[in-house]
Image: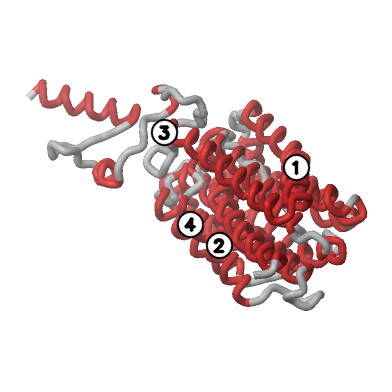
C-alpha cells in the first residue's frame, strides 16, 4: 500500500467519524423543541431525525461542491493530503469538547476552522481561498441566524395574537404541526451538514488523483456520509438537546412550530445557494426569536455562553488543526499515527468525563443545565433510567400496580391520591 493511499483511507475513515459526531452534536437542531414540548418522545424524535438526515443528504450536492472545489487550492493540498486528516481531527476534538459542556456550537465551523488551520500551516495562507470563505462561510454565519430569529419572532407574535394557542384544541394543532416542521428541519439539516463530509472526502480524492477535478461526490461517498450522520443523529446528542430545549427559552408548541418553520426555510435556501453555513446558528437564532416574539424570559447567560462558543469555534479548531497538521505532515506516516493516537485518547477522556453525569433519553427534560463535574448534583436532574422504567412512567403504572406520577406535578397527584385513600 502506497503512502498516498494510506492517507486517503485514513481521511475517509476520519471524515465518516466526524460525520457521526456531527449527527449526535447537531441532532438537537431538529428535535430539541419538539422533545421539550412533548410533540415527539425522545426516542421517536431521534429516529425520525436520523431517517430524514439520510434522505436529505442525498437530495443536493451544492454545499459539497463548495467545499471540494471552492475553499482551498487543490494543487497545494495535493502535495500533502495529510493536512485534510489533521483538520478533521481538530474538528472532531472540538465537537466532543463542546458536546461535553452541552454547548450547541457549530460543527460546520469546527470543520472549516480545522481545515483552514491545517492548510495554512502546511501550504501557507495562499492555500485558502479567502474570498470564498468570506462569502460562503463568514457572511452567512452572521446574517442567517438574525434572519431566522426575526422570522421566528414575527411568527410567534402572530401565533399568540391570532390563533389563541393556549386553547387545548389550538395547542393540539400546533403540536401536530410541530411533528411536520421538526421533520422538515431534520431533512434540511441533511441537505446542509450531510454534504460537508462529502465535500471533504471528494476534496482529498481529487487532490490525490483518485477523482477528476471539478466532478461531484461519488455515489458511495453520498451514501456513506448520509448513513454516518443518520447513525450519529440516532445516538442522540442529549446533552446539547437539554440546553437547546430547556436552557435557553421555555418553549411551548406554538413557539416550537414557529422556530422549526423559520429554521427549515433558512437552511433549505442556504443549501440551494451553496452556502456552507451552520445549522446550529440558525436553529439557535430561531429558538431565541420565539422567546423574544412571545415576550417570555430568555436565559441571556446561557446565550452568552453559546455566543462565546460560536466566536471561538473557528479559531480554536483552527489552532488544533494547525498543531495536528504540523505533526501529521512533517512527521509523515509516523506523524499521522501519532495524531490518530492523540485523537483516540482525547475522545476517550472526554466521553469518560461525560459519563460521570450522563444525559440520555430518560432524563433529558429533567433539568435545564448540563453538569460536567464528576460528582452528581441532585438539583440538576435524576440519574438515567432504564427503558422499562421510562415505559412504566409514560404508561402511568408503577411496580405496585397503582398509578405512578413523577416530577412536581406527580408529587402533588400522588399526595392527593394518598389523602383520598386516607379519607376513605
Q: CA distance from mark 4 to mark 2?
A: 15 Å
Q: CA distance from mark 1 to mark 3?
A: 39 Å
Q: Nearer the viewer, residue 266 or 98?
A: 98
Q: Looking at this rendering, what residue extends furthest in the left direction?
A: 424
Q: CA distance from mark 2 to mark 3?
A: 27 Å
Residue that label 4 marks = 179
Residue that label 2 marks = 53
| Left or right: 387 in relation to 68 | left
Query: Is residue 177 depicted above or below 363 in this figure?
Result: below
In what quadrant of the picture does the N terminus appear?
Answer: bottom right
Categorize mark 2 by other alpha carbons within 10 Å: few (<14), some (14-19), many (20+).
many
Of label 2 and label 1, which has the lower sequence position? 2
Q: Are marks 4 and 3 in contact (CB under 8 Å)?
A: no
Residue that label 1 marks = 323
Give me the residue at 64% from left, 51% from top.
337
Of label 4 and label 2, which has the lower sequence position? 2
Q: Is residue 259 visible?
A: yes
Residue that label 3 marks = 366
Front: mark 4 or 2: 2
Of label 2 and label 3, which has the lower sequence position? 2
Q: Is residue 155 visible?
A: no
Mark 4: which secondary structure?
helix
Of label 4 and label 3, which has the lower sequence position? 4
Categorize mark 3 by other alpha carbons within 10 Å: few (<14), some (14-19), many (20+).
some
Percent from the top left, x then y, of residue 135?
Answer: 86, 55
Amino acid at each position: 500500500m502506497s503512502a498516498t493511499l494510506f492517507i486517503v483511507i485514513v481521511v475517509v475513515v476520519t471524515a465518516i467519524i466526524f460525520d457521526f459526531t456531527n449527527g449526535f452534536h447537531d441532532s438537537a437542531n431538529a428535535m430539541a423543541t419538539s422533545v421539550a414540548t412533548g410533540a415527539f418522545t425522545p426516542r421517536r424524535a431521534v429516529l425520525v431525525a436520523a431517517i430524514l438526515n439520510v434522505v436529505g443528504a442525498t437530495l443536493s450536492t451544492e454545499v459539497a461542491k463548495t467545499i471540494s472545489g471552492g475553499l482551498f487550492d487543490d494543487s497545494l493540498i495535493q502535495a500533502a493530503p495529510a493536512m485534510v486528516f489533521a483538520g478533521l481531527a481538530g474538528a472532531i476534538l472540538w465537537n466532543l469538547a463542546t458536546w461535553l459542556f452541552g454547548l450547541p456550537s457549530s460543527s460546520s465551523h469546527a470543520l472549516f476552522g480545522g481545515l483552514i488551520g491545517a492548510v495554512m500551516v502546511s501550504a501557507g495562507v495562499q492555500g485558502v481561498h479567502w474570498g470564498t470563505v468570506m462569502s460562503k462561510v463568514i457572511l452567512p454565519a452572521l446574517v442567517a441566524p438574525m434572519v431566522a430569529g426575526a422570522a421566528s419572532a414575527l411568527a410567534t407574535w402572530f401565533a399568540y395574537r391570532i390563533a389563541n394557542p393556549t386553547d387545548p384544541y389550538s395547542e393540539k394543532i400546533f403540536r401536530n404541526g410541530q411533528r411536520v416542521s421538526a421533520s422538515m428541519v431534520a431533512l434540511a439539516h441533511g441537505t446542509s451538514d450531510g454534504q460537508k463530509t462529502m465535500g471533504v472526502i471528494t476534496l482529498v480524492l481529487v487532490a490525490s488523483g483518485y477523482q477528476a477535478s471539478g466532478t461531484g461526490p461519488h455515489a458511495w461517498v453520498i451514501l456513506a456520509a448520509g448513513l454516518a450522520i443518520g447513525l450519529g443523529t440516532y445516538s442522540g446528542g442529549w446533552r446539547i438537546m437539554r440546553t437547546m430545549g430547556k436552557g435557553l427559552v421555555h418553549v411551548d408548541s406554538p413557539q416550537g412550530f414557529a422556530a422549526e418553520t423559520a429554521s427549515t426555510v433558512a437552511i433549505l435556501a442556504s443549501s440551494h445557494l451553496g452556502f456552507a453555513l451552520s445549522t446550529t446558528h440558525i436553529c439557535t437564532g430561531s429558538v431565541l426569536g420565539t422567546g423574544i416574539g412571545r415576550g417570555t424570559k430568555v436565559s441571556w447567560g446561557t446565550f452568552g455562553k453559546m455566543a462565546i462558543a460560536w466566536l471561538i469555534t473557528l479559531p480554536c479548531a483552527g489552532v488544533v488543526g494547525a498543531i495536528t497538521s504540523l505533526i501529521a505532515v512533517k512527521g509523515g506516516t509516523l506523524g499521522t499515527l501519532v495524531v490518530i493516537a492523540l485523537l483516540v485518547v482525547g475522545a476517550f477522556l472526554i466521553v469518560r468525563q461525560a459519563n460521570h453525569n450522563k444525559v440520555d433519553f430518560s432524563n433529558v427534560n429533567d433539568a435545564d443545565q448540563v453538569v460536567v463535574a464528576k460528582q452528581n448534583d441532585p438539583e440538576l436532574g435524576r440519574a438515567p433510567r432504564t427503558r422499562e422504567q421510562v415505559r412504566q412512567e409514560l404508561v402511568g403504572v408503577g411496580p405496585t400496580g397503582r398509578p405512578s406520577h413523577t416530577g412536581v406535578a406527580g408529587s402533588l397527584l400522588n399526595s392527593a391520591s394518598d389523602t383520598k385513600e386516607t379519607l376513605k
